[in-house]
Amino acid sequence: MADEDSDNFSELSYDFFDEDLNDDGTKDNESDISVSPLSTPDNSPENSSSSEEESDDEDLAWRSVLRKPVNKTFSESVGATFTLDAGQNELDFFMRFFSEDMIKLLVTETNKYAEQCQETKPDRNWKDVEMEEMKAFLGIHVYLSIVQLPSYTLAWSQQWPFGSPSIPNIMTRSRFELLSKYLHCNDVTQNPPRRTPGHDKLCHIRPVLDYVLNKCVENYQPHCEQSVDEGMIAYKGRLSFKQYLPAKPTKFGIKVWERASPRNGYCHEFQIYTGKVDREKTEEGLGERVVKDLTRKIINKGHHIYMDNFFSSPKLFSSLFKEDLYCCGTVRGNRKGMPEGIKSCKLKNHGEYKIMQKNELCATAWKDKKMVFYLSTNCDPNEKITVQRKQKDGSKKDVPCPIIGQQYNKFMFGVDRADQLRMQYSTCRKSKKWWKYLLWFLFDICVVNAFICMKESVNHVIKTKKGREVARTQLSFRMQLSRQLIGTYRGSRKRKSKSNIDPSGLAHWPVKHQKRGRCKQCAIDKKRHDVFIQCKQCAVFLCIDNNCFEKWHSK
């Protein structure tokens, strides 16, 4: 059994100043998005002079006179939008995100897909799955996420001490493998062919994807601070929209854009990246489009959005400011719209920084170990702090730092915290089907979000006998959820081992055989004894002198 976890996660380090940044603040291999070749500029005097005038006007708008941006005060209520009584358990919270309707959908589509397969390749072992059996199947997956084994088959192993004493009594291994084989979420025969209008790359998982996304949004009111970042679902098989991100811990897989809360790791919205819409053209403004999609439902409420330099741009920050969304993040020094005074500044001393402002938008260049560039519409540029940096001799030195650096490090890790919670006990099992990785990704999001809601519920506070509050852990939540999903379901075996004891006691007689054979009971006792005596009904050789005949028929 896995050791009990603690949800007091150590604060994630976001000392991005140690990253391998170029002199202009960009990161190598930042994203898999390709950049189309720049068109040849028109060198005519008229176009050249007009572009220079626009550039000069843009730079004149940036000033060194600094003032605090005026932000709308955040006054929205935060937390779960539903309240459950103290008598309701982990399964009730989970059902708020993955309801009975979703389980019915899995049952219906699994039976339909199995029926379609029977037409081409009959399987005499298959029988239709029912609701209780599907719940038990999901419960076993939650169990396997806690008791993590090199191979799931070890849960049914009869070799002591590797096998589980309970799982074989709930469902046989062959039945578990059959359900895994025929598991389905949607009828893909209704999906138009590839490269035709209306084709959905995520058709296999679409009903579950849309349902879970809506439930994540409606079940929780977000905190003021939100972070937007990319995550990865590990997958190395063949897939048209599989991504390679060398800077990520998970280098190959399916990319997911996420918006999550740095306060607790709740995942509010997500978007699966399926590649370019037009295969012939590179999508322009991808980062800007993603941020706007993920924040569309929280505009005009005064939220603060944190993002990294893949998404940040002066144009995006100015646009979101008009919708009362205030942003903060690192930015690439050569990003379009950045002031020339920031892009070209050469800072030599450790801790030196320069800030320029245009309306409510502040651009900052700070010299840490390398040059770091920031954009913000929610930080006071006049506020100064110091941070500690370790020197070569091991001592620590106070270094001046703009307040935006502290804010970014404090609230940027929401998506990483959500991924940390999700992958701590992953229910995903190895599969040849790419969409099953997405299914278990959605299932884990439901489990983690349900756990966060129950942890914050005032009616479900855990207290000791002395009245001291104890933090609820994801381990205990998953243990209870697994039991409640399995419930009282017990699948019957197809064949039961026959007993050697004859009810009438008359059919088992020793007879002499023409050839000699090894005693079966002696073989069990790690001995070798060849005899001519054989049981007439069992058709096995047994000793009479060593009481093997009696021992064999007594078990």
Image (cartoon, rainbow, N blue to C red):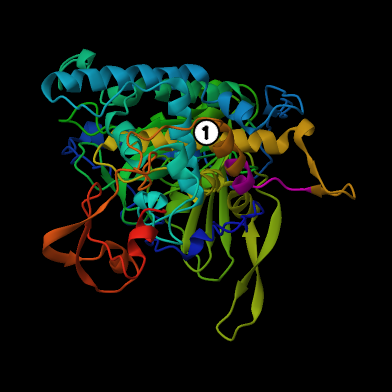
Residue at 44 percent of width and 27 percent of height: 133
Q: Nearer the viewer, residue 280 or 532?
A: 532
Asked where in the image residue 198 lies, by quadrant, the reply is top left
Magenta region: 470-478
Q: Is residue 426 a member of the stretch shown in magenta?
A: no
Asked where in the image residue 94 lies, by quadrant, the reply is top right
The mark total stands at 1
Q: Nearer the viewer, residue 458 or 371?
A: 458
Residue at 36 percent of width and 39 percent of height: 496
Q: Which residue is mark 1?
A: 486
Other-residue count near label 1 (Cα within 10 Å), few / some / many at <14 / 14–19 / ≥20: many
Seen in the image, is 365 located left or right of residue 541? right
In the image, residue 235 sits, relative to residue 223, either above or below, namely below
Seen in the image, is 49 located left or right of residue 168? left
Q: Position of residue 335 (x, y in %)?
A: 39, 44
Q: Is residue 305 visible?
A: no
Residue at 39 percent of width and 49 percent of height: 156
Considering every residue shown, the one lying at the far left of the view is: 514
Q: Amino acid at mark 1?
A: Ile
Asked where in the image residue 217 lies, by quadrant, the reply is top right
Q: Position of residue 329 (x, y in %)?
A: 52, 45
Q: Position of residue 297 (x, y in %)?
A: 54, 21
Seen in the image, is 200 located left or right of residue 136? left
| Secondary structure type for disc 1 | helix
Task: Name the quarter where the N terminus is drawn.
Answer: bottom right
In the image, residue 338 sits, relative to residue 510, either above or below, namely above
Q: Position of residue 50 (x, y in %)?
A: 30, 32
